[in-house]
Amino acid sequence: MIVIKLSGGLGNQLFQYSIGRKISLNIKTDLFVNIDNLKNFRTPREYCLDKLNVCCKINPNTSGLKIINEKFFHYDNNLNISDNILLKGYWQSEKYFKEIKHILLNEITPKINLSNLFIKYKSKIESCESVSLHVRRGDYLTRGNLKFHGVCSLDYYNKAIQHIKERINNPVFFIFSDDINWVKSNLMINFEKYFISNYNIFDTQFDEFFLMSKCKHNIIANSTFSWWPAWINQNSNKIIIAPLNWFSESNKNVNSNDLIPDNWVKL
């Protein structure tokens, strides 16, 4: 069996699940996840995968398993995996699981019922040249996260909007953020736009997550929560824009080159 030690929120859990799913299919064994670490994360997290149609079970017992730790942040081309292992790490590169994208697209779908507001916005999103724009501030502004992650600059978002403007006729922006007031005060978008807050509007984070995935194009933050909707976006002509610098200046030595797929635009 393969056991993945989960850490972080929905986006992180999906990376960890996806590498485990790929390995379990390759060696024809069962996939389990261990969730003991979620409450001890720097920001305590809930187990999210049970709300999706994923193919794994929870296994609290990891004794006797060989531990494989992620060696570095970028893709490990020499990863040697056998049966009966415990994987620890973030594994944030599509190179670990791109070969099974067709399977993951079927599994990263909601098992739960999404809200009426989801249905309302989905209809609008699918009827126009929709562009999701994700601004993550919130927990990223806490001292530890600000030093490690940082937040995407206003300059990044302005360049991303300009990039879309030059290539898409009549774009309609759907802005997703945990700090909508900051966005309204700082980000000037001279197109039709809808401000969508993830606080007090939707029943769960999955409404927001899957709405972003339904947009035809995506401008993501330095956040795996918006990375994944862009990745599962099935528009064949999609433009995905991601920040060139995923981490703060103090973490420039972290090699994040393999995090952003080659066909995405880095600004």
Image (cartoon, grey):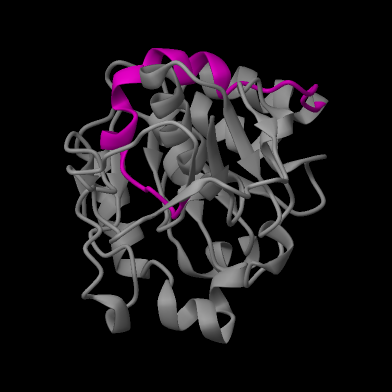
Viewport quadrant of the C terminus: bottom left
The quarter of the displayed image where residue 170 is located: top left
Camera-nearest residue between 76 and 8: 76
Which residue is the extreme one toward the front? Answer: 64
> Is residue 192 something one can see in this rendering?
no
Where 90 sits versus 153, above or below?
above
Residue 212 x, y percent position in the rendering:
53, 35
Residue 229 placement, left or right of 209: left
Say if 22 sits above or below 74 in the image: above
The answer to which of 36 and 117 lies nearer the viewer is 36
Q: Quadrant of residue 111?
A: top right
Is residue 236 on the magenta stretch?
Answer: no
Q: Position of residue 28 (x, y in %)?
A: 44, 15
Does the image show residue 259?
yes
Q: Is residue 112 left or right of 93 when viewed as pictured? A: right
Q: Position of residue 227 (x, y in %)?
A: 42, 43
Q: Is residue 103 positioned above or below 36 on the image?
A: above
- Is residue 105 rendered magenta in the image? yes
The count of marks equals: 0
Image quadrant in which the N terminus is located: top right
Residue at 19% across / 54% down in the picture? Answer: 257
**Residue at the spot 56% in from the left edge and 24% down from the top edge:** 108
Quarter holding residue 219: top left
Of residues 148 and 91, the one drawn nearer to the viewer in this rendering: 91
At 21% from the left and 75% from the top, the residue drawn is 253
Residue 180, percent across and down? 63, 60
Magenta part of the chain: 88-115
Q: Residue at coordinates 28% horizontally, 32% vertically from top-left?
A: 239
Left or right relative to 198: residue 193 = left
